[in-house]
Each structure stands twice: as C-alpha cells, then as structure tokens.
Amino acid sequence: MKHVHNLSIRVLCKQIEDSSAFKEALECFLPENASQEGFSLTQEEIRIDQGEDLISLELSTDKQRWIKHILSFLGEHVFTQNLKKLREEDDRVDQKGAWYLRFDKTAFLNDSFELVDHGQCIHVRFLLAAFPKSRENAIATKNSLLEHYSS
C-alpha cells in the first residue's frame, strides 16, 4: 500500500551554525547508493532583510523506493518509540493531507530523534496518500503508516 506521495526533510541553519555538520547528519536518511541515483541534498541561501541570513538544506523525493527507505529508517528510530504519541497527535496533519514532524536540531546532530514543537528543528513533511483527499483519510493513512513501519 502506498502511504506517501512525496516527502521532504529540511533544516534552516543560521550563519553561525555549522551547515556541513547538518549536511552530514541529514545523510543518515539517504540510501547507500543515493548519489549514484541522483538523490541529493540541495542547499540554498536565504536572504533576510532584517536579521541574519539562513542556509536551507533539503532532501526531497517522490520515488517510492527512497520514501520506503526513509520510512523504514524513521520506523526504527522514531515511530516505534513514539507510536502512542504520534497516533494521538492528529494536529500534525493539515487539511491538504500533509503530515509534519519536527526533530530537535541539537539532538539530531548527536544521532538522536527528539520530537519537538519549537522552531529550532529538522522539519519533515510527508504528503500522505489519501483518497478521497480529506484530512480524516490522511489521518487514517498516517495511522496505517505508523502501524506498518513501527513493527
């Protein structure tokens, strides 16, 4: 069963943060042969008129084999430990069927996946496969995905 149409994993780094450390940490999501198959990390500098500029690092894909790889990885490192909490948090699914997770940036650099609600985080966005498209069907897909990948 297809659970996700596409996903993206994104982190915003301040100029004072080591973006290369985040690049290296984000590679934990990638399959071993990702660079050979064109799956790569994109980097973009974001200019802010007032305040410090940011660097955006993003992994995104709509290829099912990569999505399944990332879901399996998250199942092992996140879903199993947080299954009850993730099942209950339906507010992380929006009206368009996107499911959002946030992991603490500092903990992430230490290979830990702590779910958080604050802005200093790694953003993960899943566009859930729900038909007909509705928030309720997307929540059901999210719960099915959690059951499938947390075991």
Image: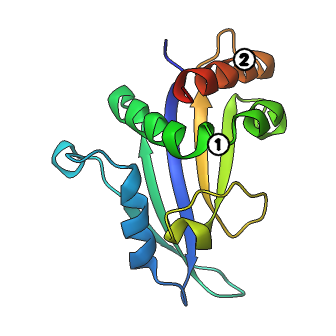
Q: Residue at x 67, y 25 (%)?
A: 142
Camera-side mark, 2 or 1: 1
The picture places residue 37, in percent across and down from the top left corner, at: 20, 42
Which amino acid is tagged 2? Ala
Q: Which residue is mark 1?
A: 81
* Residue at the (72%, 17%) spot, across then down: 140
Classify 10 Å Cα crowding around label 2: few (below 14), some (14-19), many (20 and above).
some
- Relative side of 74 to 119, left or right: left
- What residue is disc 2 on? 140
Residue 50 lies, with reference to residue 123, above or below; the image says below
Ranked by sequence position, the earlier of labels 2 and 1 is 1
Question: Helix, strand or loop at disc 2?
Answer: helix
Q: Quick check: 8 above or below 87?
A: below
Q: How is the image coloured?
A: rainbow
Question: Residue 53 location, x and y as percent?
Answer: 59, 83
Q: Residues within 10 Å of mark 1 (few under 14, many from 20)?
A: few
In this rendering, the answer to whether 148 lies above or below 116 is: above
Q: Quadrant of the C terminus?
A: top right
**Quick one: which residue is furthest to the left in this view?**
36
Give x and y (percent) for residue 124. 59, 48
Q: Is residue 77 above or below residue 120?
A: above
Rendered residue at 61%/37% (across/down): 80
For residue 11, say whether it is visible.
Answer: yes
Residue type at numbered disc 1? Gln
Assign a secondary structure to mark 1: loop
